[in-house]
Structures are given as structure tokens and as C-alpha cells.
Amino acid sequence: MAVGERAGRNQLRVGRLVKAHGLKGALKLELYTDDPAGRFVPGAEFTLQVPEASPWHGKTVTVREYRVMNGSSVVFFDDVDDRTAAEGLVKAILWIDQDEAEEPEDDAWYDHQLTGLDVVRDDVVVGRVIRVDHLPAQDLLIVRPVGGSGSAEIMVPFVSAIVPTVDVAAGRVVVTPPAGLFEELPEEEAPDADPEQDAPGAD
């Protein structure tokens, strides 16, 4: 699922750079878009999400070439000409400006569309989305549970196995969370007393 809205701008998260490929600056892509050939056209510019300590922080990259090699998506950027330069971009997340008039991609929402939605489990409202956190591995829906304190938050991985339905028009997301995500699991029964203590002849 692709989601995005950063620094007051509508942006779509479209990929993550996972590893350097070869010696000429290529990088393998993890795609968060249904239209990679349309997004990664020569000249397309992406905002980078990288740690503040990275020399790439606050910078953009421009696509020189996109191709599929051995079943993997690979991208070349301007001014990234060797493996060393490419390795400096590994784990960076790529964002692109998105026109709200543009037809949205499947399974793509802006943060402001998700914030405030009811979270429904087994037809019961169990919380409300208060924000979306974007991490390198995945997005998280941050949910305030029903009846929780003001500081109580539940981090719900925004993946289809756990969030199978997003219905913005109905104002809700449907979740099928693993046990223990929205409730305390019962404690295991206390272990039996030490058998040696109860054994005949024990001190």
C-alpha cells in the first residue's frame, strides 16, 4: 500500500532503494507503485527520505534510466555513476509530487484521507487512526484505541494482510490484526510448584 503526504505537500511514496546493482551506479528498487514504467521515466525527479546525517538529506534524484533485469526493477540516476555512489542511497525512500486531480493508483491514499478514520474489527469500532508513520520497511497506521488514554497508541502495520479494506467514503478501515495487537493476551498459567519441594523426603 502506498501512502504519502509530507511537509504539507501531497506526495506519493513510490519506491525504496534496496541495494546497489553492478558497478555503474544502478540500484535495485522495491516498488510501491502499480505503474513503475510510468513513474520512473527519464527526467522524473524524486524527493529522498534519508536520515539527517546522510549527505543526500534534503536532496532529490533524477531518473536517467529504468529497466527490469532478471525480474528485478533497476533504476539509474543522474550523477550516480558508480557502485560507491549507489551504496550511499541504499534504503532511501523515493517520493514524488502528486496532483490530487490525477487519477489515484490502486491501494494509494494520502495521509489526510486516512487520519480520523474509524478502525473496525469484526464489525466493532476498536479505535481511530490518528496519523500515519512512514518507515523504511513499511507504513504504520497509528491508532488510538476506544477507551484508551490520551497517550495510548497502537501501531498497525499498513499491509493488506492486516488492513484488508480501506473505505474512505464510509470513514473506516477494516483490520484483521494478530492476537494481542488490540488486546492483552491472557497470562500463561503459573507453572506448577517445584516437584522436588513436594516430593516425599524433601527438606
Image (cartoon, helix red, strand yellow):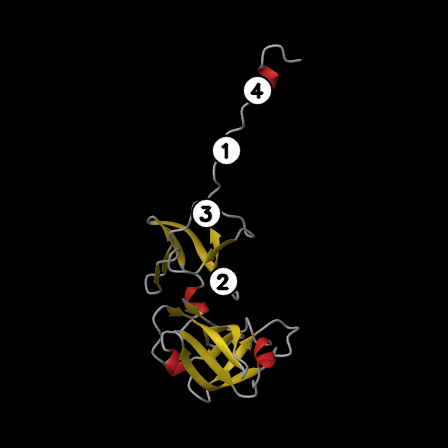
Q: Residue at x 37, y 60 (%)?
A: 160
| Disc number for residue 182 | 3
The residue closer to the viewer here, 100 or 19, is 19
Q: Residue at x 60, y 18 (%)?
A: 196
Q: Which mark is residue 188?
A: 1
Q: Which residue type does callout 1 highlight? A: Glu
Task: Tell me which numbered mark, 2 or 1, is placed earlier along the sequence.
Answer: 2
Q: Marks 4 and 3, how far apart in space?
A: 37 Å
Spatial separation of the CA atoms under disc 3 and disc 1: 18 Å
- Return the mark for residue 48: none
Q: Is residue 92 left or right of residue 170?
A: right
Dot 2 lies on which element?
strand
Q: Which type of secondary structure does the marked residue at label 3 adopt?
A: loop
Please name the residue that numbered disc 2 is placed on. 131
Point out which mark residue 195 bears: 4
Could you tell me residue 146's position as x and y percent? Answer: 45, 49
